[in-house]
């Protein structure tokens, strides 16, 4: 699966108590929307791993989104 990003994207993920908060600018939201659409068409078990080292803002929590049945 090819992960593409809109230029200038910003995404931050935080876990506050038991709530996941995803904050993103327009480019970040469009990127995530594309990723989710691609993941919906991928094989079961496919996943996308987001963290501060490859896509999220500094101090973000890790996020993995997985395609299931």
Image (spheres, rainbow, N blue to C red):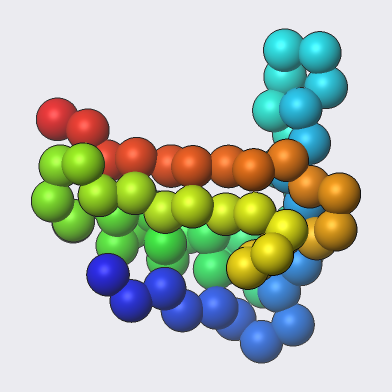
Question: x, y percentage for residue 59?
Answer: 86, 49
Q: Nearer the viewer, residue 37 or 16?
A: 16
Residue lying furthest top: 18
Height in image: 62 above or below 53?
above
- Can residue 15 be seen here? The reply is yes
Report the residue at 63% width, 68% height from top: 54
x and y, in percent, of residue 25 in the image? 77, 64
Q: Position of residue 16 (x, y in %)?
A: 83, 22
Which quadrant holds residue 29? bottom right
- For this view, does 54 lie left or right of residue 14? left
Whether residue 26 is visible, yes or no, is: no
Residue at 27% across / 70% down in the picture?
A: 1
Q: Residue furthest front?
A: 53
Q: Please say if 29 is above or below 1.
A: above
Residue located 42% across and 66% down the image: 34
The one of 8 and 52 positioned closer to us in this rendering: 52
Q: Is residue 38 left or right of residue 51?
A: left
């Amino acid at each position: 699966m090819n992960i593409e990003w809109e230029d200038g994207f910003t995404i931050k993920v935080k876990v506050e108590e038991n709530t996941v908060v995803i904050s993103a600018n327009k480019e970040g939201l469009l990127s995530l929307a594309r990723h989710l659409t691609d993941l919906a068409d991928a094989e079961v078990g496919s996943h996308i791993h987001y963290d501060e080292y490859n896509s999220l803002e500094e101090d973000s929590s890790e996020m993995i989104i997985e395609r299931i049945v």
